Image: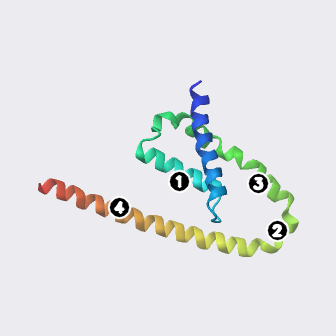
Amino acid sequence: MKYVYQFSVILLVSALGELLRLFIPLPVPASIYGLILMLAALITGVIKLEKVEAAADFLLDIMAIAFIPGGVALITAWDSLKGMLVPALVITVVTTVFVIGATGSITQLLIKAGKRVKRNDCDK
């Protein structure tokens, strides 16, 4: 019963994301709205982590399996995709390097900010 409740909470947030997509005229997928809503609800405490954690862990555990149908579909469409292989690989490599660099830079800034906060707390 715990899983049914937790999946219901996740589905409700996803449904709210779908509604936001209908009412906000931006080219943003509904899943992104849902993720932002879930993040906001978790940060503010509207939804406690314990209320969705087990179901979320399960979904993360089966994520690789969820990509199998998409991968098979790509294999079956290989003839159509051959011409886009080089541009897709270039875009993938460039964006991956950018994301790694941005993530590293932001992490370093947060670590430095955390050290400054600890030093200020020790000075008091």
Return the x and y of residue 78 as percentages of the image width and height. Answer: 84, 64
Image quadrant assignment for residue 108: bottom left
Q: Secondary structure at mark 1?
A: helix
Q: Which secondary structure lies at badge 4?
A: helix
Q: In the rendering, at what x and y percent does residue 105 appear?
A: 41, 68
> Dot 2, crowdedness within 10 Å: few (<14), some or many (≥20)?
few
Q: Residues within 10 Å of mark 4 (few under 14, many from 20)?
A: few
- Of residues 123 and 26, which is closer to you in this image? 26
At label 3, which amino acid type do we have? Gly
Q: Which mark is residue 36?
A: 1
Residue carrying label 4: 110
Which of the marked residues, 4 or 3, is nearer the chain's N terminus? 3
Counting residues from the N terminus, which is met first, the one under dot 1 or under dot 2? 1
- Report which residue position mark 2 lands on: 81
Q: Position of residue 86 (x, y in %)?
A: 74, 75
Label 3 element class = helix
Is 80 situated above or below 11? below
CA gap, disc 2 and disc 4: 41 Å
Q: Quadrant of residue 1?
A: top right
Residue type highlighted by circle 4: Leu
Marks 1,2: beta carbons within 8 A: no
> Mark 2 vs mark 4: which is more N-terminal?
2
Q: Nearer the viewer, mark 1 or mark 2?
A: 1
At x 58% / y 55%, what residue is drawn?
33
Q: Is residue 90 left or right of residue 114?
A: right
Going from N to C along the chain, the mark reached first, 1 or 3, is 1
Dot 2: element: helix
* Residue wearing tag 3: 71
The answer to whether mark 3 and mark 2 are in CB contact below 8 A is: no
